Amino acid sequence: MTRSHGGSIVILTGAGISKESGLDTFRDTDGIWAKVRIEDVATPEAFARNPSRVHEFYNTRRRRLLAEDIGPNAAHRALTELEAQWPESVLLVTQNIDDLHERAGHRQLIHMHGELLKARCAFCGCIRAWRADLSVALSCDACGRSGGLRPHVVWFGEMPLEMDAIFSALAACKLFLSIGTSGHVYPAAGFVGAAASHGARTVELNLEPSAGTSLFDESIQGPASVIVPAFVQRLLAG
Ligand code: APR
Ligand code: ZN
């Protein structure tokens, strides 16, 4: 794959790309799921059972994301550079709910698991930007009902967002990159198979081999802030 051959690119990112920015991953030994249970904070049942516990979990992560010391790293910036320089479409599909790809200037971006800096009303579905804490006491300024504001985040058991757009991009792309994801959660973990079945070249860039590493044409190990800029330079050099 070189610049001269062009061809569209689809990139999937996971929590590993934001790790060097200071945000926790999920399944590393010091990850989020080593500290709290998915069943207590990241399912519709958890929200129905104890909404304040769920709000506390996301409020803590939202405050952390908005802290002074958090910002995009060289890997986020390298993907923005690739999007700017590449002659054809570069669609970035992120599993991350942080806004670090936006802060790095990426434009064609899909948050398939939603966004921490947005809130959605469970009653009327209205979605709005939200940077403050959420609580059950708040009411929706669209429908006036209270108790229904939730993070605009996809929980386990819920459908990820924009799947049709993602699968049609996977069917058309010439190159699929998977960056900083453990390959444990579907449907994202199945994207490599979809891309490969339509003839795309597939490359994994991760700190260590993911659960699906054998499905990739090439697997590059190392910290994202090092291997992603190097890979992008190689790609743009043609
Ligand atoms: N550079 C590159 N990769 C890294 C780095 C780093 N500095 N640090 C960690 N990684 C890798 C880990 O080796 C791991 O394979 O990033 C991956 C992170 O995997 P997970 O913690 O499972 O995160 P992710 O794959 O994004 O999880 C997918 O699961 O819990 C749900 O909704 C949540 O979107 C999340 C989804
Ligand atoms: Zn509402």
Image (cartoon, rainbow, N blue to C red):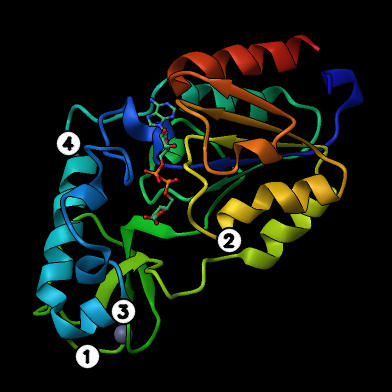
Quadrant position of residue 70: top left
- Distance from disc 2 to disc 4, alpha carbons, whole Å, reads 31 Å
Callout 2: SS:
loop
The spot of residue 83 in percent (x, y) is 65, 30
Q: Of marks 2 and 3, which one's residue comes earlier in the chain? A: 3
- Distance from disc 1 to disc 3, alpha carbons, whole Å, reads 19 Å
Mark 1 sits near ligand 2, with its Cβ under 8 Å away? yes
Tell me if label 1 and label 2 are in contact, CB under 8 Å: no
Q: Of marks 1 and 2, which one's residue comes earlier in the chain? A: 1
What's the amino acid at mark 3? Pro
Q: Of marks 4 and 3, which one's residue comes earlier in the chain? A: 3
Label 2: which residue? 187
- Distance from disc 1 to disc 4, alpha carbons, whole Å, reads 31 Å
Q: Of marks 1 and 3, which one's residue comes earlier in the chain? A: 3
Mark 2 sits near ligand 1, with its Cβ under 8 Å away? no
Callout 3: SS:
helix
Q: Residue at x 59, y 43 (%)?
A: 212
Label 3: which residue? 44
What's the amino acid at mark 1? Arg
**Left or right of 116 in this view: 144:** left
Tell us which disc is closer to us: 2 or 4. Answer: 2
Labelled disc at residue 145: 1
Q: Residue at x 62, y 44 (%)?
A: 108
Question: Is residue 161 positioned above or below 192 on the image?
Answer: below
Q: Is residue 1 visible?
A: yes
Callout 1: SS:
loop
Label 4: which residue? 67
Q: Of marks 2 and 4, which one's residue comes earlier in the chain? A: 4
Tell us which disc is closer to us: 1 or 2. Answer: 2
Tell me if label 1 and label 3 are in contact, CB under 8 Å: no
